[in-house]
Amino acid sequence: MTTKSKSTVNKAGNYTQPGKRKQIFNRIKAGSKGGKPGQWSARKAQMVAKAYKAAGGGYT
């Protein structure tokens, strides 16, 4: 039996609004655009970055 690892979302700590980014991350990861629902992909990473910046998020 495998153990589920903890989420590493926002682990780098270089986001100005980590809560907002995590909400965007979860919404996009659950969607089917750019890959299977629930599966992470490079395309979804691009979509998260774009949506986060559009929502007013920044990086430190």
Image (spheres, rainbow, N blue to C red):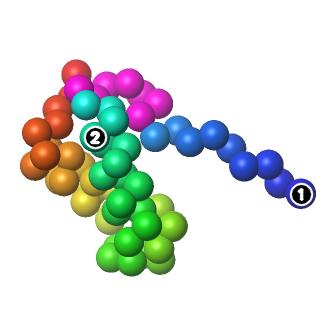
Q: Which amino acid type is shown beneath numbered disc 1?
A: Met
The magenta segment: 10-16
Q: Which amino acid type is shown beneath numbered disc 2?
A: Lys
- N-terminal label among 1 and 2: 1
Q: Position of residue 13 (x, y in %)?
A: 38, 24
Q: Which residue is mark 1?
A: 1
Q: Is residue 32 left or right of residue 17?
A: right
At horizontal 52% and vertical 38% (from top left) the residue drawn is 8
Q: Nearer the viewer, mark 1 or mark 2?
A: 2
Per the rendering, the mark at residue 20 is 2
Query: In the figure, 51 relative to 10: above or below?
Result: below
Query: In the figure, 29 relative to 17: above or below?
Result: below
Q: Quadrant of residue 42?
A: bottom left
Residue 12 within the magenta-colored segment of the rendering: yes
Q: Quadrant of residue 33?
A: bottom left
Q: Position of residue 57 (x, y in %)?
A: 17, 37
